[in-house]
Amino acid sequence: MLGLSHRGNPVISRLLLAALALLLLLAGLPTRAAAEIPHENFELANSDMSIITAMLNSSVRASETALTFFYEEKVNDSNQYLDIIGRVLVPAGQLVEEIKNVAGSYDDLSELLPPFEKLYSGERSFSSLEDDLLGIRNEVVSLSQLENLSDADLVHVLEEIRTIYSLTGSMNNTIDEMQVAAGQITTLTVADAQPFADSNLTVLIEQLRDLIHSVIEQIDQIIHNDVNWGDATPFLLLWVADASLYLEDDLVCGGYLFFNGSFSQNHQISLVMDNNNFSTLTTGAGGSFRFSYTIPIDALWLGSHLLVAWTQTPYENLSSDEITITVSRIPTNLTISASRVLLAPNQNTAISVVLKDVEGSPIPDAEIILVRDAESIALRTDTGGRTNITWQASEIGFGTHRMSASYLGMFPYASNHSADLIITVNIPTSVYLHLSAARLGVGYRIVGNGSLFANRSTPMQGQMITLFIDGVERGNATTDVNGMFAFSIPSTNLSKGTHELRASFIHREIIWRYSDATESFIIQSPQQTKYPFFPVIPGWDTDPGVTILYLFFGENAYYTWLFVLLAIGLTIKTMQARRSRAEKEKLDLGRVKELEPVPAPRKGLSIDDFALESGARPSGPYDPNEMVVQYYNRLLGFLRRKRRVAIPDSMTHRELASFLQSIGYSRTHVQRVTELFEKAMYSGSRLSEDEAVRMTTDVSRIVGESRGGAPNAV
């Protein structure tokens, strides 16, 4: 059973995010979730192991696709999916290691990744071998299309044929290794479930043997039907599928006999090993022969051997090139694991060592030497090839300890040495951290406090806590009798933005376990900048470094909305004022009476006499302001009705003056009439009689003018 937790550790959280990001790259690769795995000390969140399981399941899906492309001879496409597998396995391994360190207990967790890594390694090897095989096949095809082959070309063809058979032998061995890894993957058990059982790995891997057979058939077809051997020199070709063998492995070899211009059938071939007749063979169709022999478990077979083929023909004796084969002991695989690598003083750990041969079969009754630091102990494997021993933390002692296992080898098995296993015994500690403020202005000090406890509850007095900001050490703090510590760190040289404060229990005795805690904070400084400026609002300590969304949805967003409402109100008020003024001007233009031509005033005529004579004299007491306004309005009516001048109601007095000038009316008279009207209408001051007389004079001049012409005589 596996039991893991990452709570309170930001490193794990970042790894989880990295893992999730990698999973997004695997679009189209289905995943399968794993069940929650309990633990006696830590509760594992279901998402922790689910992420690891989903990543490994994604690698299985990618492997299935890569194997399909291998079969279709699309090596480049296969390599793209192998790259995906590599990008998944690396962070998965990091995540597993982090979980180990946090949880301190991980039964069988060390057996989770190796099968996937072994399959991935096998797929990489097969990719390289298939790429070489297809390249050589294409080269042989090219040579077979030549009409006349030189002796050098024919020798090259024979060498390529020998290489092809060697490659196919290596490919078959790689298939065997991948099948072992695939079988281990499909049978992996996690919390009594098998999350990787639903795969087609074994079927797709075995299908690759059909690919090898197909290539061999193509090569055989090319040799007998496509290559123009012509009058080639007679030859006896010998090939070996694999020149590096071990006891109980199969020696597979074969070849071709060519003489008298053709491949000879039903001809005897002698296979000689170390100058001794090893076997007699007979060529079949196409002059080919094949031989397979299982190497016995016999010490005499160990070492190097020379293998050569020999035959007699009616014309001469032929022999092949010598091939050296090497036979060694059966390889073994030795692994060591522990139920816990991180122990508290009251805990124990179960050490397990497993010995298997190259085919994955257990090796029973084998002596294993288990070494812990400088101490060694002899153990023997059971029928399952496993040996176990349990040690109390008190037996191991405080500190870090290195363990490993060795197998000296017993005929016919080869010796082996396991990887090192690190066991640590110490007392768990916990660091807690709190910041007084998460947002600080430039120049403010970073103030906060924290605590340090052993076994989550016992205060640790007089211990040093080291403080880091963004990985740079900034000082130390010492815990008091209650395990508490406080700090005040200057923010000098810290840029604006987000920073991370970490409190670490680094300087400690070996009996204490490392722990740390982190908190994030933001350095910010409001400041006025040149237009376009970022608003600086009292109580709002931010700047352009913060996203613009903060303006409208931050904790002080009500200031923004207040400004928006104020701007809207000012805009509406301005529009209302402009509309009111326009409507007033329309009203003035509407109060128009017809204005007949007014004669110029006679010399010495008073304003009263002129007004009575022109008909412009208003009833009641005489008022120059009213007279000026009345003259202006009647002028507009006259221009509209008598002169057919189109004057829009929306036009202002100044716009009307410019318009009248543009169509030929006197600039001097028009401007003076307009100025006198505005002064009488809007200034609030009383006009003089001279100004009223000037108004009548200018109006009469305008009325007397023809449109765009000279004044009429009056």
Image (cartoon, rainbow, N blue to C red):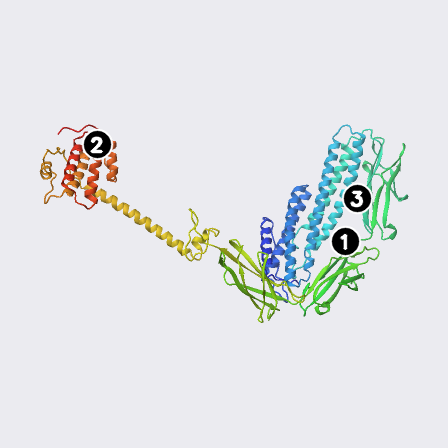
Q: CA distance from mark 3 to mark 2?
A: 115 Å
Quarter of the image containing the N terminus?
A: bottom right
The secondary structure type at the circle numbered 2 is: loop
Identify which residue, 332 or 674, lies in the foreground: 674
Image quarter for residue 279? Answer: top right
Which-is-in-front pick, marks 3 and 2? Answer: 2
The residue that disc 1 covers is: 359
Amino acid type for the residue under numbered disc 2: Ser
Residue 463 rendering spot, x and y as whole percentages: 61, 67
The answer to whether residue 302 is above or below residue 149 is below
The residue that disc 3 covers is: 241
Q: CA distance from mark 1 to mark 2?
A: 116 Å
Q: Work out whether mark 3 precedes mark 1 in sequence or the reverse, and give the earlier one.
A: 3
Residue 344 rendering spot, x and y as whole percentages: 66, 67
Identify which residue, 656 or 376, lies in the foreground: 656
Amino acid type for the residue under numbered disc 3: Ala
Q: Work out whether mark 1 precedes mark 2 in sequence or the reverse, and give the earlier one.
A: 1
Identify which residue, 52 or 102, lies in the foreground: 102
The residue that disc 2 covers is: 666
The secondary structure type at the circle numbered 1 is: loop
Residue 387 rendering spot, x and y as whole percentages: 76, 63
Identify which residue, 263 or 251, lies in the foreground: 251
Q: Work out whether mark 3 precedes mark 2 in sequence or the reverse, and give the earlier one.
A: 3
Query: Do the residues under discs 3 and 1 have CB atoms within 8 angstroms?
Result: no
The secondary structure type at the circle numbered 3 is: loop
Badge 1: residue crowd in 10 Å (few <14, some 14–19, many ≥20): some
